[in-house]
Image: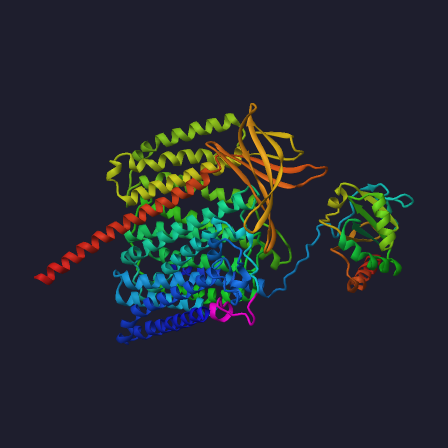
Amino acid sequence: MRKLFIWVPLVIFVAFAGLAIWALVAPPSRDIPSRLVGQQLPEFALDPQIAGRPGLSRADFRAGEARMINVFGSWCIPCRVENPQLVELARAGVPIDAVAVRDTPAQVQAFLAQYGDPFQRIGADPNGRFQVMLGSAGVPESFIVDGAGVIRYQHIGEIRPEQVPEIIEKWREASR
Amino acid sequence: MIAELGLLALWLAAGLSGFQLFAAILAGRGAAVLGEAIRPVAVMQGLLAAFAFAMLVWLFARTDLSVALVAQHSHSAKPFVYKLSGAWANHEGSMLLWVMVMAFSGALVALFERRLSVATMRATLGAQAIVTLGFYAFLLISSNPFERLATPAVEGNGLNPLLQDPGLAFHPPTLYFGYVGLSVAFSFAVGALVTGEVGRDFARTMRSWVLAAWVFLTLGIAAGSWWAYYELGWGGWWFWDPVENASLMPWLAATALFHSTSVLASRDALRVWTVMLAVVAFSMAMVGTFLVRSGVLTSVHAFAVDPERGTFILVLLGIFIGGALALFALRAGKIAEGSRFSWKSREASLVVNNVLLTALLGIVLLGTLYPLLTESMGTRVSVGPPYFNPVGAIFFFPLVLAMMVGPLLRWRDTKWTPVVQRLAPAFAAMAFVALLVVIDGRAGLLSGTGLVLAAGLALASLLPLARRKPWRAPLTLWGMVVAHFGLAVTLAGASAESAFIEERLVSLTPGESTRISGWDVTLRGTIPVAGPNWTAIEGELAVSRDGAIATILSPQRRSFWSPPQTTTEAALWTRWNGQLYAVLGEPAESGKRKVRLWWKPFVTLIWYGALLVALGGLLALSGRARSALRRSIAVGRATQRREVA
């Protein structure tokens, strides 16, 4: 009993040291895995954000086609930086819908006029409630949803030019 | 020139520490001449380290911007106190402070400890040399505080404004003193393991060091908690943050250690267990330092984070702790078993104390490392109050019961009936408070139980004084009574705060008011104010009851310009029965201001209790010092008499 007990502290310490070495060596990862990846989109229906463009609802994701949802705000500087990449993605054939968070029609119009307009539908999320339902913590964020309405990928932060091919690849995977 | 002198002193101290280690090893193999040199070398090393630290403080006092560390952490327009505290409010300086206090303690041990055998003393100072040598290497190789800049900076970066606060100027050094005290206990334990001499003398030699370390840790944790409470403006006093846990774990281990040390010193029991705890206590200090500085855990107040330093600390940890625990595993089997005792004895109650404290230590360690553990398996979690509070309570509440009973038991064996009779008033108080809590209905299970136990412990802790003339009672007994009573006070404060807290988060236009706990709080307006190195927006909140103004609260949002950072200065108004806590928020829409208010009943008891706990430790320490003094005088007289004869 005693013979065994006196080795316990050393064993615990070695386990701790192993964990600590792993923690020091493992590359620090900053991504926060979304609990919603692999899950069905929740039921929702958002009003149109600007005149002449449809709003966004759960039904739009039952058509059997993989789509991207971009959560943005005209007041958000990284969203401006991101917009050319979205335009490029749209040109490459990725259908993109948007959710405008805490925004006004006039400012969204101005934003699209100045920086480009890649969006097929734009839903209004005036108080950020839908953003929370999506499990999105900030803007911009992008989600790829497959033809069955299952969220397949979440991208946190702006999509940078070098990340465009990766996003297209994710969209192709979701399309299969 | 001053920086170079400091660096030279540091190198010399490191060299002496290496010499001390080899002298200890060779003397153990028969080189008696080298053995003679160990004590003076330890003293020299302490003096050199102190000199090096003094040079660093000097550099900060003069704001010598040709030194990289000063340029990074100081600024010419900083208040003088914070220039000085800037010397240790950074990674390099704090490590130098740590090694300085450690070397200095080594010198004290070398000068004054006379109880241990020559061989054990030698091994102890050898172990001390290994530890200091590790820290010198760390400083000189990867964290040189005296490094010069190629071209002197024009102006310094300044000190993080959150740290420009009296609480924080003295919180880290206090904790380091505690850690160092534990490192001395660690050296004694290693020395005792080497020679196998684990007995009363070992416990008596170590006891004062552990107690002193524990007092410093108590004060350091209390100061840190007070700082987080009023400076961060989040309204809480304990967040179960990894950095906080890093200081709590050594405290738990030290608490267990000095209780078991007292059993070993008085009754020569718990030998192996005490040696192990002495190693574990210092391991916790090192593990805590590693977690805080390596950045492997994300914390709200991680500082000086650097993976390279983390690697270095981990290597030191492996050498010190891995080595000591391996030595323990190999040698502990050879330590003779100590005295036995009945399960109805003070020894047994202290064993219960130790088991519960160790369990608490285990759950805090597990909770702190759990995010790391799950991350290594691919998922991310964060562990917070929903785990720590209930799981901790499972062990803490029985611990409070043991604290009520334990001091009333005798050594070796006790009869139950008289003890239960003596505890009757405490049980009555608990029943009364329980009744009040149930009638009131606001307290939850944890906070309600906390209030009941606090009442019981407050009364029970005084009982050891009841049947004797209090002024005749030894200081060590007074120390225990005051410390246990202090813990009851802290528990009462924490439970009352969590049971009866009120909170308001409102947006007010000037002239508008809100009501909290019977007080009307009116936002009169906001004004700009300026300090030595900051500007601020100050809110003027009039607190009134029935139309009569009671006080004006002036919470601020401060903007420091070097480094640029905004801090909130909460305004606190202390009443006998609690505190009103006000934080000025950001401007809200259409000229409104967000204001956050808390009424925190009896929250100040948390820190008053902690001060009492520390005072108890001091009383016990001075009791020990007094009897040690008497003994050494008696020994001196005896020697004189012998010489005369």
Q: Residue at left 48%, top 38%? A: B494
- The x and y percentages for residue B452 are 45, 33
Look at the image and give the residue range highlighted in magenta.
B139-153
Q: Quadrant of residue B483?
A: top left
- Name, please, the residue furthest toward the left: B645
Instruction: Left or right? Give the position of A66 relative to B463.
Output: right
**Residue B282 to residue B67: above or below:** above
- Asked if residue B181 is among those painted magenta in the image, a careful observer would answer no
Whether residue B362 appears in this view of the structure is: yes
Q: Nearer the viewer, residue B280 or B109?
A: B109
Asked whether residue A152 appears in the rendered view, the answer is no
Judge whether B272 appears above or below A98 on screen: below
B356, B575: nearer the viewer? B575
- Picture quarter with the N terminus of chain B: bottom left
Residue at the spot 35% in from the left edge and 66% down from the top edge = B47
**Drawn side of residue B425 relative to residue B599, left or right:** left
Residue B626, given in percent of the width and then of the height, sits at: 25, 50
The picture places residue B454, in percent across and down from the top left corner, at 43, 36
Percent x, y for residue B102?
A: 39, 62
Instruction: Tell me where residue B331 sits by quadrant.
Output: bottom left
